[in-house]
Image: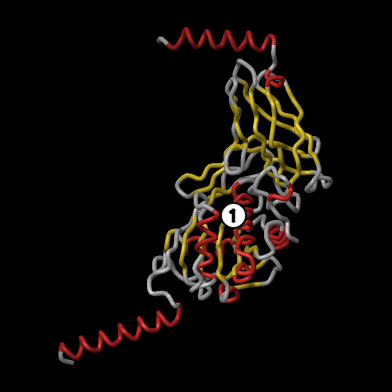
Amino acid sequence: MKARPYATLIAGLLMAGAAHADQASQIRAEQAWIRVMPAGLPAGGYVTLHNGGDEAAALTGASSPDYGHVMLHESTTEGGMGRMKMIEKLAIPAHGEVALAPGGYHLMLMHGSASVHAGVQVPVTLQFADGSKTTVQFLARPANAVDAGPESATGHDH
Amino acid sequence: MKPSTLLRWLLVSLLVAAAALLAGCQHDEPLPFRLTQVSGHMPDLDFHLVNDEGKPVTAADYRGKVNLLYFGYTHCPDVCPLTLAHLHVVMQRLGPLADGARILFVSVDPARDTPAVMHAYVNAFDKRAVGLTGSAADVEALVKRYRASFSREPAQGDGNYEVSHSSAIYIFDAEGHARLLATPADSQDSLVHDLHLLLAPGVKS
């Protein structure tokens, strides 16, 4: 029962925080890229989110004018089985960071427009638990890229 | 046969076998692999599938190459591309030796993975990758042969669905014998090291 006063306190702080600084404005995004897939197949989106604020933030969704549907997912490989599950929200601790990176948390971008190809910037709007939003430019990279770049770090040899 | 004759016969056989091995690979000790060795624990590569050009193929078509077998599906946006991207880097690091190797990407989602989709998919990763699909029964036979597994997850609202699947990479030598097992946790260095041994026996790497 000791936890309850703390829970109330934290809830109070969160509400107070939301009143003067929305979550989106506390977040700095880096290393944003999309693994562009051929044949209109779903693509993975990756970004590192830094929370510069004093309150925790939570990513709850994303959208992009270049994709019909974007979902928040997590990949796991436990017991030799690769699995993917949808997640409702992803917490970013106060003064902390969370990486959406290959093999873990990622955006699944579906039904991409034909204009998306390696090298272009794709705007993706990230939505947070308090309803605030921020738009981040994601670099479209070749399917066989292993990270955000630079372009010379990996090859697309044909 | 008297016991002493049997013993002598056994000794001679062993010497002949040892000499043949030494002459064959110029090694006096087992190859120092870093990945999990599965020689003798898994059956030779064998399948009847359709390649990404729509042609029926069997394992015999890929004999003579070191084959890296990986199960996945093209609607997999994260783990499959990550694995194939890593294998592409491994192939690049092998340099000209990579011509002796193939990545065999087998779909566990043959309902959606037509040869055309597989072709576009594998070629986005590596020119030495081959996409293999086929009937559900033929895919399942190969999956079972290597004690792998997959299961289709419930569809989401828009009809899209995911397929959970074994994440291992099975490595076969040029004669089709299962030799090594890699997991996503194994480093590119280990893969490059061991493929070097398989592709150029006798060359210290």
Residue on which disc 1 sits = B72
**Residue most toward the front?**
B204
Query: Which of the pair B187/A45 is nearer the observer?
Result: B187
Query: Can you give x and y, in whole percent of width and height, for residue B56 in the image?
Result: 64, 72
In which quarter of the view is residue A127 placed? top right
Q: Is residue B56 above or below residue B104?
A: below
Q: Is residue A24 above or below residue A19?
A: below
Query: Can you give x and y, in whole percent of width and height, for residue B191 in the image?
Result: 53, 59
- Image quadrant occupied by the N terminus of chain A: top left
User: In percent of the image, x 51 and y 61: which residue is there?
Assistant: B193
**Residue most toward the right?**
A115
Q: Can residue B141 be seen at all in this image of the molecule? A: no
In which quarter of the view is residue B58 placed? bottom right
User: In percent of the image, x 68 and y 40: which residue is there?
Assistant: A45
In which quarter of the view is residue A19 placed? top right
Q: Is residue B155 above or below residue A51?
A: below
Q: Circle 1 marks a residue in which chain? A: B
Query: Can you give x and y, in whole percent of width and height, for residue B3 in the image?
Result: 15, 87
What residue type is disc 1 on? Answer: Gly
Query: Which of the pair B85/B108 is nearer the observer?
Result: B85
User: In percent of the image, x 59 and y 20: which residue is there?
Assistant: A94
Query: Can you give x and y, in whole percent of width and height, for residue A9 in the image?
Result: 53, 8
Q: Is residue B74 above or below residue B46?
A: above
At mark 1, the secondary structure is strand
The color scheme shown is secondary structure
